[in-house]
Image (spheres, grey):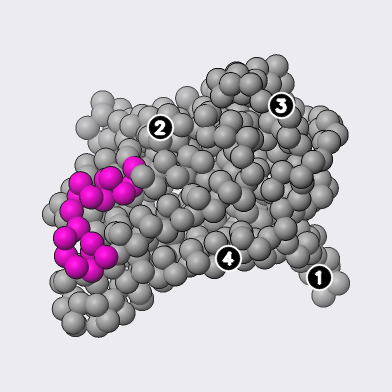
Amino acid sequence: MWKSAAAWRERTFQALRHPQYRRYWFSQLLSLVGSWMQTTAQQYLVLELTQGSSAALGWVTVAQFTPSMVLSLFAGAIVDRVPRRRVLLTTQVILMCTALLLAVATHQGFVSLPLVLVLAFVGGMAQAFDMPARQSMVVDFVPRSDVPNAVALNSLSFNVSRTVGQALFGVVAALGVSLLAGGNADQISRLAFPFYLNVASFFVVIYVLSTLPFPPREIRGRGSMLDDVKEGLRYVRATPAVRNVMLLVGALSLTIINFNVIIPYYARVVFGAREGGFGLLSAAFGIGAMAGALWQASRPNPLKYLRRGALILVVGAVLLAASPNAAVATPVLALCGFGMLSLLVSANSTVQLTIPDHLRGRVMSLYSFVLAGMGPPGALIASTLISRDFPLGSRWGLVTLTGLGLACVLLLWSRLPRELATTPTVQAVPAD
């Protein structure tokens, strides 16, 4: 028993054997905890500034993710032209500055919704470059055989940090009452403390990025920026394994993968749950997502759960629509989280292991576009279909949304890759 547990642990966390990846992974975990604390604090801040307006939260989401829709392709071309260390250090400094400005504005009492929207937009612009650069980094610190495991561990760190960061927010906000608000629990300055802690976490990441020995990567002669973008698009269009995986991720991002809208709406409107019930449902989804990431981390073949994960996600969404109350929905949402992460880790690993290094930034920026860039239109579609004011109602609306996603899965089923293509050999030259 102990031997099997040790073997599972070694297999699941094998990418952490590489010292450089291990340093990077732990620094990102710390930074993401701070980012999730800030995200939760920002949501509370917006609600307090607008007397509970859900529309205001929606506009902040649009401001944050619109740059990914607009800039993703050009961001990828820049990531392939410029050393990744320089890109990441620039984005981290910008994100740290937005967090600092938000912290000071909240602490001093001159924060406003327009300021939050502007900072969300600036942060979104930085994220449009940060995401493809960060996803491209996986292959920099682990050998090809460990890339699927590293991708799964990156997803694990994201979901662990979300759960921990959201849980820590309550404690940190309480400390902010005494440290920044003079004991007044109604003073908005209390919410500045999570922002300050997030600023502190950026120093760790910046230090690690500055000292990591980035390996050499392939650099080829460049034409115009537009030519670079076209080259990336031509590659995706001409490579079925990459193209069809991205079509699947994009289709599901427009339909089922909108749990940031589905969970709060079902918790408050369909199930009539209070804050505690909403927290339980969110935690269940997060635990399922962590389980999915851990499961994928222990699997040697990243393609195995590309189809299975999509089916588990579809089944979970239908069961959620049929759930009579929050108690039944709790394990169902864990199943949804497991299916979603199994699918996304498999998709990311497949793309990472297929593309050549000189196109990695551009292709991963397109991947970021179909995943994150579809967030605003996907949220609009989901919120419309599951609304109690929609003719079908919330439950049949979710079934309809799931049916659209299932139709896309079935259309792409036979076209999804069943084995990994061989990545062309990279001619390394010093780039960083």
- Dot 1 or dot 4, earlier in sequence: 1
Could one spot residue 29 in this view of the protein? no
Q: Closer to the N terminus: mark 4 or mark 2?
A: 4
Q: Which residues are magenta?
A: 104-121
- Secondary structure beneath dot 2 equals helix
Residue of label 4: 207
Res 290 quadrant in image: bottom right
Q: Spatial distance from mark 3 to mark 2, Cα to Cα?
A: 38 Å
Please name which of the two marks, 4 or 2, marks the residue nearer to the observer. Answer: 4
Question: Would you call the spot at circle 1 few (<14 residues within 10 Å), some (14-19), or many (20 or more)?
Answer: few
Q: Which residue is mark 2?
A: 378
Q: Amino acid at mark 3?
A: Gly
- Counting residues from the start of the chain, the first of labels 4 and 3 encountered is 4
Three-letter code for the amino acid on which mark 1 is drawn = Ala
Residue 82's x, y, as percent? 61, 40
Q: Earlier in the sequence, mark 1 or mark 3?
A: 1
- Residue linked to disc 1: 6
**Kind of element beneath mark 1:** helix
Q: Which residue is mark 3?
A: 221
Instruction: Return the disc, 2 or 1, that comes first in the chain's sequence.
Output: 1
Percent x, y of residue 18: 78, 62
Disc 4 to disc 3, C-alpha distance: 31 Å
What amino acid is found at the position of numbered circle 2 in the picture? Gly
Dominant SS of magenta comes to helix
Q: Position of residue 145 (x, y in %)?
A: 83, 48
